[in-house]
Image: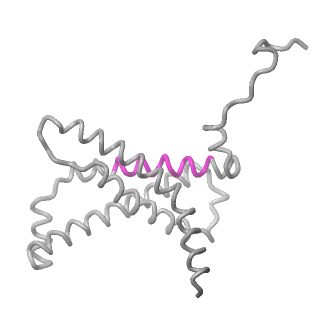
Amino acid sequence: MTLQSIKRFLVGLFREMAPTVLFFFVAFLLIAVMFKLFVAEYLIEFSAFTEAAVAALILGKVILLIDWAQSGHSFGSHRRIVVIACKTFVYALAVIALGIGERILKAAHEAHSLSEGVDAFIASANLDRFLGLVLLISMVVFLYLLMQEIERAMGKGALLRLLFKRPDPIPDGGLPRTP
């Protein structure tokens, strides 16, 4: 591989990932800022920007990888809402698995033993908070997948034009035409 082909690959990867990562960054930043506002009276330190950036990068990459892996599979015979719900469920399961794995590894690192780490994880597990976080992430993923399906149905770029393009002026000052 030449330097030019590597550069083209990296630029293409950035262009492919940028909209997805930006969507998740904004969504997670809003959630993190709301969390920070909710816990402000308890003087809990929390870096909303860093948490949102890391979560957006991870989830943005995971979604693109799963989309790439499913690119050969067609969901044409199923209703779009079923596809969105099933994909959201799969992503939620992935978030649960990765979240549990991350917490076990962190506890194992601190305890210097995997079995002690699992025991520490179980002892300190806050199931309500964890499931609430999974639900929030699932809602954000659901919105992303919903917009992705709308984009697919309307055509590439149509959703952006619908949301951000100025509407055409109404002829005759906005008065209805008579036939």
Residue at x 44% of width, y 61% of height: 90
Where residue 176 sits: x, y (%)? 80, 13
Residue at x 29% of width, y 38% of height: 34
Query: Where the N terminus falls, by quadrant?
Result: bottom right
Residue nearer the viewer, 67 or 43 = 43
- In this rendering, is residue 26 above or below 105? above
What colour scheme does the image use? one colour
Where residue 95 sits: x, y (%)? 35, 61
Residue nearer the viewer, 156 or 8 = 8
Examine the image and state in which quarter residue 168 appears: top right
Query: Where the C terminus falls, by quadrant?
Result: top right
Residue nearer the viewer, 92 or 19 = 19
Where residue 163 sits: x, y (%)? 61, 37
- In this rendering, is residue 148 above or below 65? above
Judged by its main secondary structure, the magenta piece is helix
Q: Which residues are magenta?
A: 135-150
- 122 magenta-colored: no
Residue at x 61% of width, y 38% of height: 164
How many marks on residues? 0
